[in-house]
């Protein structure tokens, strides 16, 4: 399917995305990278600097922290409530991550650009999660419908 068709297929109301980004506080990022050249590193940095509590998830036992934030090696290892699970993994892994997001009690399952699976979305929605696929929260944060958190110190 052409990328333009995928974008239209996973089109969300601006209010839906804004509500999610206003309501979540804690984001577990599955596929977080310590490599500063990776897109997931940049997204983690911006979300963290915007005020979200970031919980990087990376299975590599050598990666212990990213940007000074302790790394979890699986979603199941996280020892606190998670509002949103953001997925930076191949879309073939999205269904399994959806199952884990449900198991840890997340409220939102967010698939990064290129990450979408209608079966995973149905599973998560049936369990009461809000779902966003093929979108980047970093990009959505700065769309005109949502005001950045200007009250934060730099």
Image (cartoon, rainbow, N blue to C red):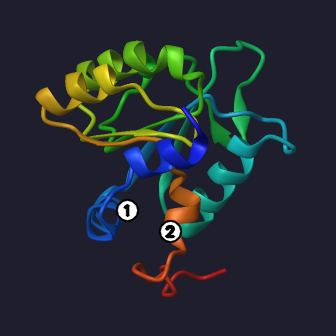
Q: Which mark is residue 151?
A: none
Q: Which residue extends farthest bottom?
A: 151
Along the line of sight, which residue is nearer the eye, 141 or 45?
141
**Element on which disc 2 rests:** helix
Q: Residues within 10 Å of mark 1 (few under 14, many from 20)?
A: some
Q: Are the two marked residues, 1 and 2, in contact with CB atoms closer than 8 angstroms?
A: yes
Can residue 95 be seen at all in this image of the molecule?
A: yes
Q: Residue at x 73, y 33 (%)?
A: 33
Of the 4 image quadrants, the one containing the C terminus is bottom right
Residue under label 1, please give it: 21
Q: Residue at x 60, y 82 (%)?
A: 153
- Report the side of 73 relative to 127 (left or right): right
- Position of 112 compared to 130: left or right? right
Residue 81, given in percent of the width and then of the height, sits at 29, 37
Which residue matches tag 2? 141
Query: Is disc 2 surrounded by few (<14), some (14 to 19) or many (20+) residues within 10 Å?
Result: many
Judged from the image, the secondary structure of the residue bearing numbered disc 1 is helix
Q: Position of residue 94 (x, y in %)?
A: 45, 21
Residue closest to the eye, 151 or 139: 139
Where does residue 141 sit, x and y in percent of width and height?
Answer: 50, 68
**Horizontal arrangement in the rendering, residue 129 relative to residue 137 (left or right):** left
Q: Is 74 situated above or below 87?
A: above
Q: Residue at x 54, y 41 (%)?
A: 112
What x and y, as percent, mark residue 68? 71, 45
Image-quadrant location for residue 49: bottom right
Q: Is residue 148 above or below residue 78?
A: below
Residue at the location (38% across, 16% down)?
95
Q: Quadrant of the N terminus?
A: top right
């Amino acid at each position: 399917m052409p990328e333009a068709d995928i974008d239209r297929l996973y089109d969300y109301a601006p209010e839906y995305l804004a509500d999610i980004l206003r309501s979540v506080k804690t984001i577990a990022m599955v596929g977080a990278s310590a490599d500063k050249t990776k897109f997931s590193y940049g997204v983690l940095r911006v979300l963290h600097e915007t005020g979200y509590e970031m919980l990087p998830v990376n299975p590599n036992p050598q990666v212990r922290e990213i940007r000074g934030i302790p790394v979890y090696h699986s979603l199941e290892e996280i020892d606190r409530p998670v509002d949103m699970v953001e997925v930076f993994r191949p879309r073939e892994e999205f269904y399994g991550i959806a199952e884990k997001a449900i198991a840890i009690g997340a409220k939102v399952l967010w698939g990064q650009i290129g990450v979408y699976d209608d079966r995973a979305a149905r599973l998560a929605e049936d369990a009461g999660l809000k779902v966003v696929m093929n979108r980047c929260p970093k990009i959505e944060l700065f769309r005109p419908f949502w005001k950045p958190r200007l009250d934060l110190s730099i």
